[in-house]
Image (cartoon, rainbow, N blue to C red):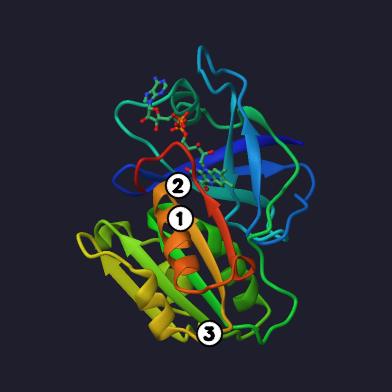
Protein backbone atom coordinates (compact mmCIF):
# COMPACT_ATOMS: atom_id res chain seq x y z
CA UNK A 1 0.00 0.00 0.00
CA UNK A 2 1.26 3.47 -0.82
CA UNK A 3 1.85 5.81 2.09
CA UNK A 4 3.03 9.40 2.34
CA UNK A 5 5.51 10.74 4.87
CA UNK A 6 3.90 13.32 7.17
CA UNK A 7 6.29 14.25 9.95
CA UNK A 8 8.75 13.07 12.56
CA UNK A 9 9.53 14.03 16.12
CA UNK A 10 12.56 13.39 18.32
CA UNK A 11 11.22 11.96 21.60
CA UNK A 12 14.59 11.48 23.32
CA UNK A 13 18.17 11.65 22.09
CA UNK A 14 18.28 9.54 18.89
CA UNK A 15 14.75 8.13 19.41
CA UNK A 16 12.31 9.30 16.78
CA UNK A 17 8.64 8.87 16.06
CA UNK A 18 7.51 8.86 12.41
CA UNK A 19 4.05 9.38 10.93
CA UNK A 20 2.87 8.28 7.48
CA UNK A 21 -0.64 8.63 6.07
CA UNK A 22 -2.41 6.37 3.62
CA UNK A 23 -5.36 6.76 1.28
CA UNK A 24 -7.35 4.13 3.12
CA UNK A 25 -7.15 2.64 6.62
CA UNK A 26 -4.31 0.17 7.14
CA UNK A 27 -5.66 -3.24 8.12
CA UNK A 28 -3.82 -4.51 11.20
CA UNK A 29 -4.29 -5.84 14.69
CA UNK A 30 -2.71 -3.79 17.53
CA UNK A 31 0.78 -5.22 18.16
CA UNK A 32 1.53 -6.08 14.51
CA UNK A 33 4.30 -4.75 12.28
CA UNK A 34 4.82 -3.82 8.63
CA UNK A 35 7.74 -3.56 6.23
CA UNK A 36 8.36 0.01 5.12
CA UNK A 37 9.89 0.37 1.65
CA UNK A 38 11.64 3.62 0.74
CA UNK A 39 12.52 4.61 -2.79
CA UNK A 40 15.83 6.44 -2.35
CA UNK A 41 18.02 3.92 -0.54
CA UNK A 42 21.42 3.61 -2.20
CA UNK A 43 23.85 0.78 -1.49
CA UNK A 44 22.28 -0.69 1.63
CA UNK A 45 23.29 -4.34 2.10
CA UNK A 46 19.85 -5.07 3.62
CA UNK A 47 18.00 -3.32 0.83
CA UNK A 48 15.27 -0.72 0.77
CA UNK A 49 12.95 -1.95 3.53
CA UNK A 50 12.90 -2.44 7.29
CA UNK A 51 10.27 -3.80 9.63
CA UNK A 52 8.54 -1.45 12.08
CA UNK A 53 5.93 -2.12 14.74
CA UNK A 54 2.85 0.05 14.39
CA UNK A 55 2.28 2.16 17.48
CA UNK A 56 -0.95 3.74 16.21
CA UNK A 57 -4.49 2.38 16.19
CA UNK A 58 -6.03 0.76 13.10
CA UNK A 59 -8.79 3.39 13.22
CA UNK A 60 -6.36 6.33 13.08
CA UNK A 61 -5.81 8.14 9.77
CA UNK A 62 -1.99 7.93 10.05
CA UNK A 63 0.31 5.10 11.02
CA UNK A 64 3.17 5.78 13.38
CA UNK A 65 6.23 3.94 14.63
CA UNK A 66 9.32 4.53 16.77
CA UNK A 67 12.90 4.03 15.70
CA UNK A 68 16.45 4.87 16.70
CA UNK A 69 19.06 6.79 14.75
CA UNK A 70 22.76 6.60 15.50
CA UNK A 71 25.52 8.88 14.23
CA UNK A 72 26.85 6.07 12.07
CA UNK A 73 23.77 4.76 10.33
CA UNK A 74 22.74 2.54 7.45
CA UNK A 75 21.78 4.03 4.07
CA UNK A 76 18.18 2.98 4.82
CA UNK A 77 18.05 4.91 8.09
CA UNK A 78 19.68 7.90 6.39
CA UNK A 79 16.98 7.85 3.68
CA UNK A 80 14.30 7.62 6.36
CA UNK A 81 15.75 10.51 8.33
CA UNK A 82 16.00 12.76 5.30
CA UNK A 83 12.47 12.19 3.95
CA UNK A 84 10.70 15.43 3.17
CA UNK A 85 6.98 16.10 3.67
CA UNK A 86 4.76 14.27 1.18
CA UNK A 87 7.52 11.88 0.04
CA UNK A 88 5.95 8.60 -1.02
CA UNK A 89 6.79 5.18 0.41
CA UNK A 90 5.16 1.78 0.56
CA UNK A 91 4.20 -0.66 3.29
CA UNK A 92 3.64 -4.39 3.08
CA UNK A 93 0.87 -6.42 4.73
CA UNK A 94 0.69 -6.23 8.52
CA UNK A 95 1.97 -9.35 10.25
CA UNK A 96 2.82 -10.75 13.65
CA UNK A 97 1.29 -12.61 16.56
CA UNK A 98 2.33 -10.30 19.39
CA UNK A 99 -1.32 -9.34 19.82
CA UNK A 100 -3.89 -9.53 22.61
CA UNK A 101 -5.44 -12.95 23.30
CA UNK A 102 -9.19 -13.28 22.77
CA UNK A 103 -9.95 -13.97 26.43
CA UNK A 104 -9.85 -10.76 28.50
CA UNK A 105 -9.07 -12.68 31.70
CA UNK A 106 -5.61 -14.01 30.81
CA UNK A 107 -2.95 -12.23 32.89
CA UNK A 108 -0.51 -10.50 30.52
CA UNK A 109 3.13 -9.73 31.25
CA UNK A 110 4.54 -7.03 28.95
CA UNK A 111 8.35 -6.99 29.00
CA UNK A 112 10.00 -4.16 27.06
CA UNK A 113 13.67 -3.43 26.41
CA UNK A 114 14.13 0.22 25.31
CA UNK A 115 12.10 1.10 22.22
CA UNK A 116 10.70 -2.44 22.30
CA UNK A 117 8.01 -0.65 24.36
CA UNK A 118 6.54 0.35 21.00
CA UNK A 119 5.17 -3.20 20.65
CA UNK A 120 2.68 -2.53 23.44
CA UNK A 121 1.62 1.01 22.50
CA UNK A 122 -1.13 0.07 20.07
CA UNK A 123 -2.53 -2.62 22.39
CA UNK A 124 -2.65 -0.19 25.33
CA UNK A 125 -4.22 2.51 23.15
CA UNK A 126 -6.80 0.00 21.98
CA UNK A 127 -7.68 -1.10 25.52
CA UNK A 128 -7.92 2.53 26.69
CA UNK A 129 -10.14 3.44 23.73
CA UNK A 130 -12.42 0.49 24.43
CA UNK A 131 -12.30 1.09 28.21
CA UNK A 132 -11.32 -2.54 28.69
CA UNK A 133 -9.34 -3.48 31.78
CA UNK A 134 -7.10 -6.51 31.58
CA UNK A 135 -4.62 -7.75 34.21
CA UNK A 136 -1.35 -6.39 32.75
CA UNK A 137 2.06 -6.47 34.45
CA UNK A 138 4.64 -4.20 32.79
CA UNK A 139 8.43 -4.54 33.08
CA UNK A 140 10.25 -1.78 31.21
CA UNK A 141 14.05 -1.86 31.00
CA UNK A 142 15.66 1.47 30.13
CA UNK A 143 19.06 3.05 29.87
CA UNK A 144 17.81 6.36 31.29
CA UNK A 145 14.47 7.81 32.44
CA UNK A 146 14.64 10.30 29.59
CA UNK A 147 14.14 7.41 27.17
CA UNK A 148 10.84 6.35 28.77
CA UNK A 149 8.21 6.24 26.01
CA UNK A 150 4.40 6.25 26.01
CA UNK A 151 3.92 7.68 29.52
CA UNK A 152 0.59 9.06 28.26
CA UNK A 153 -0.52 5.41 28.04
CA UNK A 154 1.22 3.78 31.01
CA UNK A 155 0.12 6.61 33.35
CA UNK A 156 -3.50 6.28 32.26
CA UNK A 157 -4.01 2.53 31.90
CA UNK A 158 -4.67 0.74 35.22
CA UNK A 159 -1.66 -1.60 35.13
CA UNK A 160 -1.40 -4.24 37.86
CA UNK A 161 2.32 -3.53 38.04
CA UNK A 162 4.61 -0.97 36.44
CA UNK A 163 8.23 -1.85 37.06
CA UNK A 164 10.82 0.45 35.50
CA UNK A 165 14.31 -1.05 35.56
CA UNK A 166 17.10 1.42 34.94
CA UNK A 167 20.56 0.35 33.74
CA UNK A 168 22.87 -0.93 35.10
CA UNK A 169 20.16 -2.91 36.90
CA UNK A 170 18.97 -5.92 34.99
CA UNK A 171 15.62 -7.63 34.79
CA UNK A 172 15.74 -11.31 35.61
CA UNK A 173 13.36 -14.12 34.75
CA UNK A 174 13.24 -14.87 38.50
CA UNK A 175 11.83 -11.40 39.18
CA UNK A 176 9.20 -11.80 36.48
CA UNK A 177 8.16 -15.21 37.80
CA UNK A 178 8.07 -14.02 41.42
CA UNK A 179 5.79 -11.04 40.76
CA UNK A 180 3.32 -12.31 38.17
CA UNK A 181 0.61 -15.03 38.12
CA UNK A 182 1.85 -18.49 37.04
CA UNK A 183 -0.68 -18.73 34.20
CA UNK A 184 0.43 -15.44 32.58
CA UNK A 185 1.06 -15.00 28.90
CA UNK A 186 4.50 -13.39 28.71
CA UNK A 187 5.31 -10.92 25.92
CA UNK A 188 8.94 -10.03 25.18
CA UNK A 189 10.04 -7.17 22.92
CA UNK A 190 13.45 -5.52 22.55
CA UNK A 191 16.83 -6.31 21.04
CA UNK A 192 17.60 -9.87 19.99
CA UNK A 193 19.93 -10.49 22.96
CA UNK A 194 17.46 -9.04 25.45
CA UNK A 195 14.61 -11.19 24.15
CA UNK A 196 16.57 -14.41 23.67
CA UNK A 197 18.25 -14.20 27.09
CA UNK A 198 14.97 -13.68 28.94
CA UNK A 199 13.15 -16.25 26.86
CA UNK A 200 15.82 -18.88 27.62
CA UNK A 201 15.80 -18.08 31.35
CA UNK A 202 12.00 -18.12 31.57
CA UNK A 203 11.89 -21.50 29.87
CA UNK A 204 14.61 -22.78 32.18
CA UNK A 205 12.41 -21.73 35.12
CA UNK A 206 9.48 -23.70 33.75
CA UNK A 207 7.49 -21.20 31.64
CA UNK A 208 6.16 -23.25 28.73
CA UNK A 209 7.26 -22.06 25.28
CA UNK A 210 3.58 -21.69 24.37
CA UNK A 211 3.15 -19.03 27.09
CA UNK A 212 5.86 -16.77 25.63
CA UNK A 213 5.16 -14.44 22.71
CA UNK A 214 8.04 -12.39 21.36
CA UNK A 215 9.30 -9.99 18.71
CA UNK A 216 12.86 -8.87 18.55
CA UNK A 217 14.02 -5.75 16.78
CA UNK A 218 16.97 -7.08 14.79
CA UNK A 219 19.95 -4.90 13.87
CA UNK A 220 20.30 -3.40 17.34
CA UNK A 221 23.03 -4.43 19.77
CA UNK A 222 20.97 -2.85 22.53
CA UNK A 223 17.83 -0.74 22.71
C1 LIG B 1 9.13 -8.00 14.10
C2 LIG B 1 10.07 -6.81 14.04
C3 LIG B 1 9.63 -5.58 14.50
C4 LIG B 1 10.49 -4.49 14.45
N1 LIG B 1 10.05 -3.28 14.91
C5 LIG B 1 10.91 -2.23 14.92
C6 LIG B 1 10.50 -0.95 15.40
O1 LIG B 1 9.34 -0.74 15.79
N2 LIG B 1 11.42 0.05 15.43
C7 LIG B 1 12.71 -0.15 15.00
O2 LIG B 1 13.50 0.79 15.05
N3 LIG B 1 13.12 -1.33 14.53
C8 LIG B 1 12.25 -2.36 14.48
N4 LIG B 1 12.68 -3.57 13.97
C9 LIG B 1 14.06 -3.67 13.47
C10 LIG B 1 14.19 -2.93 12.13
O3 LIG B 1 13.54 -3.63 11.09
C11 LIG B 1 15.67 -2.72 11.74
O4 LIG B 1 16.32 -3.96 11.62
C12 LIG B 1 16.38 -1.87 12.78
O5 LIG B 1 15.73 -0.60 12.86
C13 LIG B 1 17.86 -1.66 12.43
O6 LIG B 1 17.95 -1.16 11.13
P1 LIG B 1 19.26 -0.38 10.67
O7 LIG B 1 19.05 -0.01 9.26
O8 LIG B 1 19.54 0.72 11.65
O9 LIG B 1 20.41 -1.42 10.91
P2 LIG B 1 20.79 -2.78 10.12
O10 LIG B 1 20.57 -2.70 8.65
O11 LIG B 1 20.16 -3.89 10.84
O12 LIG B 1 22.35 -2.79 10.31
C14 LIG B 1 22.94 -3.38 11.44
C15 LIG B 1 23.92 -2.42 12.06
O13 LIG B 1 25.00 -2.10 11.19
C16 LIG B 1 25.61 -0.92 11.59
N5 LIG B 1 25.81 0.09 10.50
C17 LIG B 1 26.03 1.37 10.70
N6 LIG B 1 26.22 2.03 9.55
C18 LIG B 1 26.09 1.15 8.59
C19 LIG B 1 26.17 1.25 7.19
N7 LIG B 1 26.45 2.40 6.59
N8 LIG B 1 25.93 0.13 6.48
C20 LIG B 1 25.65 -1.03 7.08
N9 LIG B 1 25.59 -1.18 8.44
C21 LIG B 1 25.82 -0.11 9.19
C22 LIG B 1 24.69 -0.32 12.65
O14 LIG B 1 25.24 -0.62 13.89
C23 LIG B 1 23.41 -1.07 12.43
O15 LIG B 1 22.59 -1.07 13.59
C24 LIG B 1 11.82 -4.65 13.96
C25 LIG B 1 12.23 -5.89 13.48
C26 LIG B 1 11.37 -6.96 13.51
C27 LIG B 1 11.84 -8.28 12.97
How would you rate the neighbour count of disc 3 (Cα within 10 Å): few for under 14, some for 14-19, many for 20 or more? few
Q: Quadrant of residue 1?
A: top right
Relative to residue 157, is residue 101 drawn left or right?
right
The residue under the point 46% across, 20% down is 75
Relative to residue 64, is residue 70 drawn left or right?
left
Q: Is residue 190 above or below residue 178?
A: above
> Which callout, 3 or 1, points at the residue further toward the start of the chain?
3
> 81 or 185: which is nearer to us?
185
Label 1 near ligand 1 (CB < 8 Å): no
**Where residue 175 sits: x, y (%)?**
35, 77
Location of mark 3 (residue): 182
| Residue at mark 1 to residue at mark 2: CA–CA distance | 5 Å
Q: Secondary structure at mark 3?
A: loop
> 77 or 208: which is nearer to us?
208
Location of mark 1 (residue): 195
Location of mark 2 (residue): 192
Q: Secondary structure at mark 1?
A: helix
Amino acid sequence: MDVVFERKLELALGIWQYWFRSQRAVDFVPGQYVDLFLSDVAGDPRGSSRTFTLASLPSEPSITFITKHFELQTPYKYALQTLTADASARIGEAMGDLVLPKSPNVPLVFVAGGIGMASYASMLRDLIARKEERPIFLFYVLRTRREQLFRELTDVYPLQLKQIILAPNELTAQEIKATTPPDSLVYLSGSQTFVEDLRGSLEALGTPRSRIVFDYYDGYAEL
